[in-house]
Amino acid sequence: MQTSSRLIYEAAGCTFFLGVLGTLLFDTPVLGLNGTLWVLGLCGGVAVLTLRWRKTATLRETLPFAGIGVLGMLLLLRDAPPLTAAIVLGLLGLFVLFIRQQQVATLHPALRAGIGQLSLVQTVFSAWLRLIPDTLNFDYRRLNTHRSSVHATGIARGLLLTAPLLLVFGTLLASADQTFERILLSAIQIDIESAWWHIVRVVFFGGLAAGVLRGSLFVLDVDVRHEPKQTIGATEIQVILGSIALLFGGYVMVQLPYFFGGLETVLGTRGLTIAQYAREGFFELSWVASLSLLVLFGLHTRLDDTARPQTAFRQMALVVLLLLTVMLMSAGQRMLVYVGEFGLSAMRLYVSVFLVWAALVFFWFGATVLRSQRDRFVPGAAIAGFVLLMGLTLANPEAQVVRFNIDRASQTRTFDVSYALSLSTDVVPTLAESAEHLPSATDRSAVADALLCAYDDPAPRGWKGWTWSRSRAYAAVQMHQTELWWHASDAALNCSEVRRPFVR
C-alpha cells in the first residue's frame, strides 16, 4: 500500500477526533454506553479508511474486526467490574489480532513468511509503543506536496508562533488596566486541573486510536529477515518438560486418594478441613495451568526444526497436557466441594469459566501445535475465549450467583446479605424478585432497605454510563416497590442511615 500525504492527514484527523470523543465520553467513572460509542467510532474510522485505501478485505481479516464490534456492544449489557474488565481485555486482544492480520495482507507475498512469524508482543510494540519515537522522527516536510498541505502547515506554524506572543502581550496589558484584566479573565476561564485531565484523556484515547490506525493502514517498520536464533534441542526439551512432568506427576499421585475418595477421605486426613482442601488449591492450580501453557508455547517457538527435537517435544508435551488435564479435573472437584459447603461467589464462577477455557485451549494446543499447525492456535484460542465471554455476559453471572445462593438458603437457612449487596446492579432484579424468599426477616429487611435507598430516584444517573443492567435495576425496584416496603424497616424512611450499595 502506497503511503500518501492525504492518508496521513486523514489518519491524523481520525486520531484527533477519537481523542476528543474519548475525553467527552469518559468524564464519568462508570463504563457503559460511552465505551460502546467509542469502540464503534474507532471501528467506523478503521473501516472507512481501510476500505478507502485498501479496497479489499478477506473474511479472515474481518473476523477479529467483527468480534471487536460485538464485544463493544456487550459493554451495554452488564455492570459487573470483573466482566467489564474481561471485555476490555478481549477488545485489546482482538485489536492486536486484527492488526496482525492486516499486516500479513498488506505486505508483499515475499515478506509474508517473515511477518507471519511475528509474535503478538512484537505487533503491540510496533503499533503502539513506537508511536512517540516515530512521531518525533517523522519528516513532515514530505507532506508539503499539495497546496492544501502547505496552507495547513502554515496555519499550524502561525498558531504555534502566535501563542507565546499573545500570552506575553496579554499579560502586560492586563497588568496595565484592571478593567481589561477582568474582561480578559472572564472571557478565558480555564480550570487548570480540568484542562490537564482533558489533555491526558485526549492523548490516551488518541494514542489507542493511533496504534490501531497505524497497524491497520501503514506497514509496520519491523525486521522480517530470517536471522539465526537460539534454538532448543531434544536434550533440553527432555530435561525441561521431563522435570515438569515429574513434578506434576508427583502432585497427581498425592491427589489421587482425595480425587477418588471424596469427602470421606478429606475428612479422614489428619489436620485437613474441607475449607483447606477446596480453597487452598483451586486458584493455585489456575495459575499453574496458565503458566504451563505459556511455557509450552514459548518452547515450541524456539524449537529446533529437525525431526528429533520435534518428536521429543510432542511426546513430552503430550504427557504434560494429560497431567494438566487431571489437575484441572481436581481443581473442578475442589470447587464443587467448596460451593456445596460455603455457597457460590462471582469470583469462583469466573475462575471456573476460566478453567473451562484453559481445558479447551489445552485440547486445541494438542490439535494444532503438536501437529505442526501453530498458526491456527492463537485464532482458535481467541475464538474459544470470545464465545465463552459472550456466553458469560449473556448469562448474567452475578445474578446466577445470587439466585443459586437464594435457592441454597432454603435448605441451609443462611444467606450472605452483605456479599449480595456488594455486587453490581446486575443482581438487583433478582434480589427485588426474591427478597420475600430469603430465610430470615432480618435479611429481607436489609435487602429491602438497600434497594429502596439505592434507587429512590427513578431518573437515570447519566446517559454516558447507561447499561441495560442499570436500566433494569431501576425498573425492577419500581415494579416491586410495594413488596419491598412491606419488608423494609423504619430506616428506609431516612436513607442516610442505610449504606447505599450498587452506586459507583
Image (cartoon, rainbow, N blue to C red):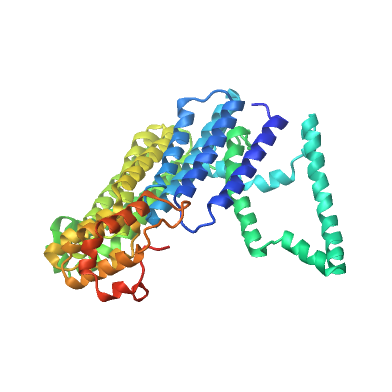
Residue at 34% across, 57% down: 425
Instruction: Please say if 375 is above or below 239.
Output: above
Residue at 67% across, 32% down: 7
Residue 45 relative to residue 87: left or right: right
Quarter occupied by residue 386 = top left
Q: Position of residue 500 (x, y in %)?
A: 36, 68
Residue at 83% across, 56% down: 166
Please give the count of numbered marks on the rendered protein. 0
Instruction: Please say if 318 is above or below 307.
Output: below
For the C terminus, the image quarter is bottom left
> Between residues 242 and 210, which one lies in front from this camera angle?
210
Q: Position of residue 85 (x, y in %)?
A: 43, 53
Q: Is residue 157 visible?
A: yes
Quarter occupied by residue 70 = top left
Quarter occupied by residue 1 = top right
Q: Position of residue 246 (x, y in %)?
A: 32, 53
> Between residues 234 and 500, which one lies in front from this camera angle?
500
